[in-house]
Image (cartoon, coloured by chain):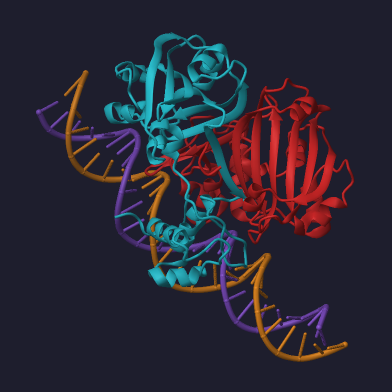
Chain colours: A cyan, B red, C orange, D purple
DNA sequence: AAGGGCGGCTTGTTCAGACAAGTTCCGACC
DNA sequence: GGTCGGAACTTGTCTGAACAAGCCGCCCTT
């Protein structure tokens, strides 16, 4: 049993998906929805705020909400875990450790992971495949406090994040992502089977646990054409809302 | 005079920025903050939700909120207008129309802009510079209903979006962005002064007005190293999504 | 000294009501 | 027929209250 506003959001999402509210249509007013679920207007506002944050519906003061899009967006976990994302998209994903050893953190890594200069990190290099095609090279520096959990994993472990959560209770909670384009180095080129200097989509990200303590600093390099990042937004700035005594996210 | 929750959010952001709440520190509880501003708890929750969405603070049920980061990152929500973004970042930006003519929409453009096959669009090619350095090539297909506003602009117009808002009341309200990496074509290479085939960061985006009516479908190509996109998220919010390359593109 | 449990604190969810601000639409007027 | 104004509707902001759920530290036990 989930919470009420999540349930309302899910049912609305379903209604949009199955065409009851096509793209461009206006949703019922908040009070209509509140009546339908015997909920207060505030709870309904939490529900529609979820869909707004997902980019599915848009809203303006005074006018009824409209449907912008049908497809649903995916969750935080899928952004942090390549394996989990691949699974939900219906791909077979595989990965292998090519390299795994402790070394000193570079100045950049130390800064990102909030470590003292020269602290030890666990350096990991992995190659990721979708349906047997090499798609991404992943270079990660793990903070020392999570290193043991990573070192004990088998070389073909599919999802480090999943394993860490299960074995050590280390859970990714916050993330920051930097996205740009870089030319393939000679190692990248060999592993991804592209020419040296050809374009790669680079996603660097810092993952932290629930206390804001950094877990890892990662640089992923995707072969051009294999992956696209997708963002929806609206001017309404506040993707979040609240209402009588509560707000949501 | 802005609204109360925005004011609270701004003051909290300032306090974090000036070090009153350093990274890792715990914020006061909701009721403390409510007392301080003589506001209800609900209003305070709206304020902290703003900061949460910006990735500045994190929150977990039962525990006090913590500071994750000081700076406010430049988020996609603000990346509506290149000119506007450049200005807030302190750059001198310039741009020039290299090409501007009506033609038939390609099948992709027709789909994105929700137009019938073969409808007319206004095709625009612009070169964007930051501090006199060519940084981005922009290829836009404008829907016919906004074409007149664009055609009347001077060749060195800095911000089409600003002009359209002023002159015709056409306001960008919703956006969807697709981000990946592509090799520079020969035109791109000449304009951006890079070698052909060198990596470019590509941002395609669809802009719609307040009714969800498509305004433009744009393809921006940034020279590698000139721009990095940045996204923050946490377990409750995921503004960014990853899509497989070949499907649905 | 190490471990466990309980209680107080804090965030999450929900309710009902009120007013402000913006949109829509129809009807009156020119 | 077109335009202007206003009424009805809808979303945005805010209050105050209550309970649930999760976290943390203190204290007591072993």
Residue nearest the viewer, comparing A119 with A236: A236
Number of labels in the image equals 0
User: Seen in the image, is B157 located left or right of residue A244?
Assistant: right
User: Seen in the image, is B14 located left or right of residue B150?
Assistant: left
Is residue B56 at least partly visible in the picture? no
Residue nearest the viewer, comparing B37 with A147: A147
Which quarter of the image is occupied by the N terminus of chain A?
bottom left
Q: Please, is residue A32 above or below residue B210 in the view?
A: below
User: Seen in the image, is C9 located left or right of residue A234?
Assistant: left
Residue B64 percent location from the top left of the image:
43, 40
Residue B39 percent location from the top left of the image:
54, 55
Which residue occupies 62% across, 61% down?
A: A60
Q: Quadrant of residue A134?
A: top left
Residue nearest the viewer, comparing B38 with A91: A91
Residue nearest the viewer, comparing D17 with B57: B57
Residue A209 percent location from the top left of the image:
41, 31
User: Seen in the image, is A189 located left or right of residue C27?
Assistant: left
Which residue occupies 66% across, 57% down?
A: B115
Q: Please, is residue A45 above or below residue B131 in the view?
A: below
Which residue occupies 77% across, 46% down?
A: B123
Q: Quadrant of residue B134?
A: top right
Q: Quadrant of residue B78?
A: top right
Residue A249 percent location from the top left of the image:
48, 49
Is residue A207 at least partly visible in the picture? yes
Q: Please, is residue C19 above or below residue D22 in the view?
A: below
């Amino acid at each position: 049993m989930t919470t009420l506003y999540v349930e309302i959001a899910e049912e609305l999402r379903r209604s949009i998906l199955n065409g009851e509210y096509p793209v461009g249509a206006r949703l019922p007013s908040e009070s209509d929805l509140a009546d339908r679920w015997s909920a207060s207007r505030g709870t309904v506002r939490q529900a529609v705020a979820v869909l707004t944050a997902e980019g599915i519906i848009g809203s303006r003061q005074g006018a009824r909400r409209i449907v912008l899009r049908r497809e649903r967006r995916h969750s935080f976990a899928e952004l942090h875990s390549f394996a989990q994302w691949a699974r939900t998209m219906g791909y077979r994903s595989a990965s292998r450790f090519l390299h795994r050893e402790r070394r000193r953190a570079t100045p950049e890594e130390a800064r990102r992971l909030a470590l003292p200069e020269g602290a030890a990190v666990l350096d990991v290099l992995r190659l990721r495949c979708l349906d047997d095609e090499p798609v991404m090279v992943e270079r990660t520096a793990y903070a020392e406090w999570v290193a043991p959990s990573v070192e004990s994993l088998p070389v073909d472990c599919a999802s480090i994040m999943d394993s860490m959560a299960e074995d050590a209770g280390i859970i990714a909670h916050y993330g920051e992502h930097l996205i740009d384009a870089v030319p393939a180095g000679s190692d990248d080129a060999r592993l991804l089977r592209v020419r040296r200097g050809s374009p790669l989509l680079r996603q660097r990200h810092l993952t932290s646990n629930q206390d804001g303590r950094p877990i890892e600093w990662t640089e992923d390099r995707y072969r051009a054409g294999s992956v696209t990042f997708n963002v929806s937004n609206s001017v309404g700035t506040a993707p979040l809302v609240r209402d009588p005594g509560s707000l949501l996210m």
